Amino acid sequence: MKSEVKSFINEKTKKLEVLYKNLQLAYWEAALKGEKELYEEYGRKELALKKFFNNKDDFEKVKKLQKEEADELTARQLKLLHDAYLSYQGDFSLMTEITNKATEVERKFNTWRAEFEGKKLSDNELKEILNKETDSKRLQKVWESNKTKGKLVAKDILEIVRLRNTLARSLGFRDYYEFSLKVNEQKEEEIEKIFLELDKLTKEPFIKLKEEMDTVLAKKYKIKKEALAPWHYGDFYFQEGPSIYEVDLDKYYQKDILKKAEEYYKSLGLEVRTILDKSSLYEQPGKYQHAFCINIDRKGDIRTMQNLKNNERWMETLLHELGHGVYSKYIDSSLPFILRDYTHTFTTEAIAMLFGRKARNSEFVKNYCNITQEEAEKIKETVKKILRLRQLVFSRWVQVMFHFERALYKNPEQDLNKLWYELVKKYQMLNFQRNEPDWASKIHLISNPVYYHNYMLGEMLASQLHCQITKHITHNPNSDYSGKEEVGKYLIDKIFKPGARYKWDKLITMATGEPLTAKYFVEEFA
């Protein structure tokens, strides 16, 4: 039976490797160029992978083989194969319809450009206006121009949500939300418990911080606090927070953030040049406007897609995406293909966030932006406040996304416009509402469904790892880890190298000595 198991896994892996690489390459080309034909090709490649896993006989075979005695690596491969097959069971014609519709919506998102004052502007250009403009009426127009993409795709998203639910219910699940968590080794009650705890621990600190923000912003825009609206808070979703402190980090990142990032990772013993050489780093027409990292073949072809500008936001994003990149790069290449991946999506998010935070670290600024120790000490506490603001604001924003998306799948027929702003008021404490599908302007609802909560789990794990690193290696809670190759080695040995060999909860306990907890995030920022 052992030979039968290994023979089955080897046979399926050979086919899977080809399908996986074809899909990743197709997505890269579509996101890079934005052409309709390329998105259609990406859709076909995605369907080919789904067709492979849609095989009911193979699914039954996996379930049968799981009952047999097997070594650790074999058992783990079978578990991940089981979840992958389960992900794509059901009516394939319905699956095809969902894929085609979702691919078209992604294309609409990625090629969309806002109309503002007679010009088509990129997200970078809109964000720049939002950050620099002080006229409230013009700010409102910029903010509203960004939200027009919600109207463009809202009906499509709802149709896809209904279809996803239909597919999930045909497999015995309440809805697609429950189904998606299941096949990604998560439980809804566990996620809910973590978010309730997080809400409880961050609510009061956020109330105080929000009051501080409102005082500064009311003065800046020369309006009463009650008149503050979403467009006054520095980004389109109030997910990062406004600049309210006297230190403007953008001024430190006006020169070659690419060089700074490469030097930083090199100092940790983590090589990123091969990743950067394959990456698409700057804006171009039709291109995906945000950023992602992609592992093309699980054999070393790792790339990032970005739209870099020399400012703090893109310094953070660059460090973040390269965090994803080094995770994939240093996974043990001798592992079987199925295990040559991160153990869970939020563990790679944790590494990306751990490094992305360094853009808001005075030690990092000193080491890579040519400032003196005296100036670094001078800005140290303020930079900490900037990072704290960003983290607390983000934690409240993720609450909105988590609760909204779960409610969306439970009942897509409810008044979603109203629900969205009820959650915005509850968690972000913005007293604002309008009857528009602004919720639909968030691409993750289509491109990464039932994913957003993982960003917050990643932030928690990042703080947990930071505690381990600063306690046992750098002995400095404000350290950016520069020059500490021991940090790179710790992450390679404990997080990267094991790949998907262990389930995420076991890996975290092995790496940090305890299960995932919110306490380190709260201690660090709340």
Image (tube, rainbow, N blue to C red):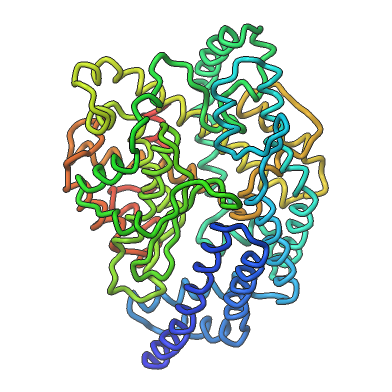
Residue visible at 77% across and 52% down in the picture: 158
The correct choice, above or below, for 171 with respect to 270 in the image is below
- Asked if residue 28 shows in the view, the reply is yes
Using the image as rendered, state which of residue 319 and residue 507 is in the foreground.
319
Q: Is residue 350 left or right of residue 150?
A: left
Q: Name which quarter of the figure residue 300 lies in.
A: bottom left
Q: Nearer the viewer, residue 12 or 141?
A: 141
Residue that appears at 38% across and 83% down: 69
The C terminus appears in which quarter of the rendering? top left
Q: Is residue 512 left or right of residue 248?
A: left
As drawn, 259 above or below 376? below
Q: Is 157 positioned to the left or the right of 21 in the image?
A: right
Residue 421 visible in the current orientation: no
- Residue drawn at x 34%, y 64% is 499
In the picture shown, does residue 151 fall above or below 177? Answer: above
- Residue 449: percent from left, percent from top: 62, 54
Q: Position of residue 494 (x, y in %)?
A: 26, 56
Residue 98 figure quarter: bottom right
User: Residue 462 at what x, y percent from top left?
Assistant: 37, 42
Q: Quadrant of residue 304?
A: bottom left
User: Number of labelled discs?
Assistant: 0
In the rendered image, the vertical position of residue 352 relative to residue 48, given as above or below: above
Image coordinates for residue 17, horizontal then vertical, percent: 45, 78
From the image, which quarter does the N terminus lie in?
Answer: bottom left
Q: Residue furthest front?
A: 118
What residue appears at the point 75 percent right and 76 percent down from the top-left corner? 93
